[in-house]
Image (spheres, rainbow, N blue to C red):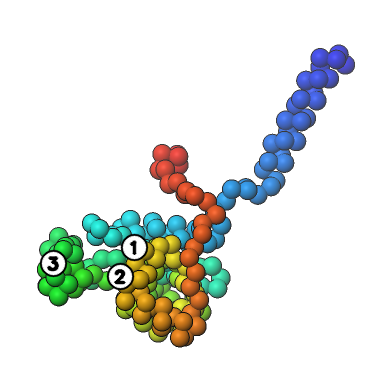
């Protein structure tokens, strides 16, 4: 065999070996479970029509199955076009959105697709308020991962932490392993 042919053969064998080894090994840059669940919470928040605050929540069981998803919005059949989105009015005014909005965590718990949430964990984009914390405790959720706690000093959130500490529900600020998760519909052909 000529030297040139031998070189060509060697290149071909190496190329086959490389492509085989690439396909025999798992991807290294796959999405870890926790990032996946928090990304799901964020994706859910994109459904919210609230002009100022979009919150998403995702509840997961011990088998890493998503059992509940929610975002902040008005109750079922209360029109997004008729009820007010304003938060500028007095909080006790019926023109204020706070009178009507169901929070993401509450929606997730109330719309869960399983009969019991005992022992599950919650991924939420914002630390839960006191009202959602009551539901979290009563539903049996045992762990909370949150992204933001920008309102931590407000009484509503202090009360939430007080209840969570009292009943021993763990809560932790979530640190993602990836800075970004891109969803580009054009990449799927
Ligand atoms: Zn809440």
Q: Is residue 96 above or below residue 5?
A: below
Asked whether residue 132 appears in the rendered view, the answer is no
Task: Decide: few, some or many residues near mark 2? Use Cα within 10 Å; few <14, some 14-19, many ≥20.
Answer: many
Image quadrant containing the N terminus:
top right
In the rendered structure, the answer to whether residue 153 lies left or right of residue 140 reads left
Mark 3 Cβ inside 8 Å of ligand 1: no
- The secondary structure type at the circle numbered 3 is loop
Task: Decide: few, some or many residues near mark 1? Use Cα within 10 Å; few <14, some 14-19, many ≥20.
Answer: many
Cβ–Cβ under 8 Å for marks 3 and 1: no
Please name the residue that numbered disc 2 is placed on.
103
Q: Is residue 39 above or below residue 123?
A: above
Please name the residue that numbered disc 1 is placed on.
55
Q: Residue at x 29, y 66 (%)?
A: 72
Mark 3 vs mark 2: in front:
3
Farthest residue toward the right? 1
Q: Nearer the viewer, residue 115 or 131?
A: 131
Asked whether residue 176 appears in the rendered view, the answer is yes
Task: Return the mark for residue 129.
Answer: none
- The secondary structure type at the circle numbered 2 is loop
Task: Decide: few, some or many residues near mark 3? Use Cα within 10 Å; few <14, some 14-19, many ≥20.
Answer: few
In the rendered structure, the answer to whether residue 29 lies left or right of residue 165 reads right
- The answer for how far apart the CA atoms under marks 3 and 1 are is 21 Å
Cβ–Cβ under 8 Å for marks 3 and 2: no
- The answer for how far apart the CA atoms under marks 1 and 2 are is 8 Å
Residue 48 percent coordinates (x, y):
28, 60
Mark 2 Cβ inside 8 Å of ligand 1: yes
Q: Residue at x 28, y 60 (%)?
A: 53
In the rendered structure, the answer to whether residue 187 lies left or right of residue 47 reads right
Please name the residue that numbered disc 3 is placed on.
89
């Amino acid at each position: 065999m000529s030297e040139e042919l031998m070189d060509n053969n060697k290149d071909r064998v190496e190329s086959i070996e490389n492509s085989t080894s690439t396909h025999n090994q798992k991807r290294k840059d796959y999405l870890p479970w926790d990032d996946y669940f928090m990304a799901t919470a964020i994706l859910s928040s994109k459904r919210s029509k609230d002009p100022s605050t979009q919150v998403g929540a995702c509840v997961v069981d011990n088998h890493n199955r998503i059992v509940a998803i929610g975002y902040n919005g008005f109750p079922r059949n209360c029109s997004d076009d008729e009820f007010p989105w304003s938060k500028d009015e007095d909080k006790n005014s019926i023109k204020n959105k706070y009178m009507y909005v169901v929070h993401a965590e509450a929606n997730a718990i109330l719309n869960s697709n399983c009969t019991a949430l005992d022992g599950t964990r919650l991924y939420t984009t914002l630390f839960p308020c006191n009202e959602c914390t009551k539901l979290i405790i009563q539903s049996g959720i045992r762990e909370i991962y949150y992204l933001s706690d920008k309102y931590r000093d407000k009484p509503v959130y202090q009360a939430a932490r007080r209840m969570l500490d009292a009943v021993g529900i763990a809560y932790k600020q979530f640190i993602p392993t990836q800075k970004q998760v891109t969803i580009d519909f054009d990449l799927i052909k």
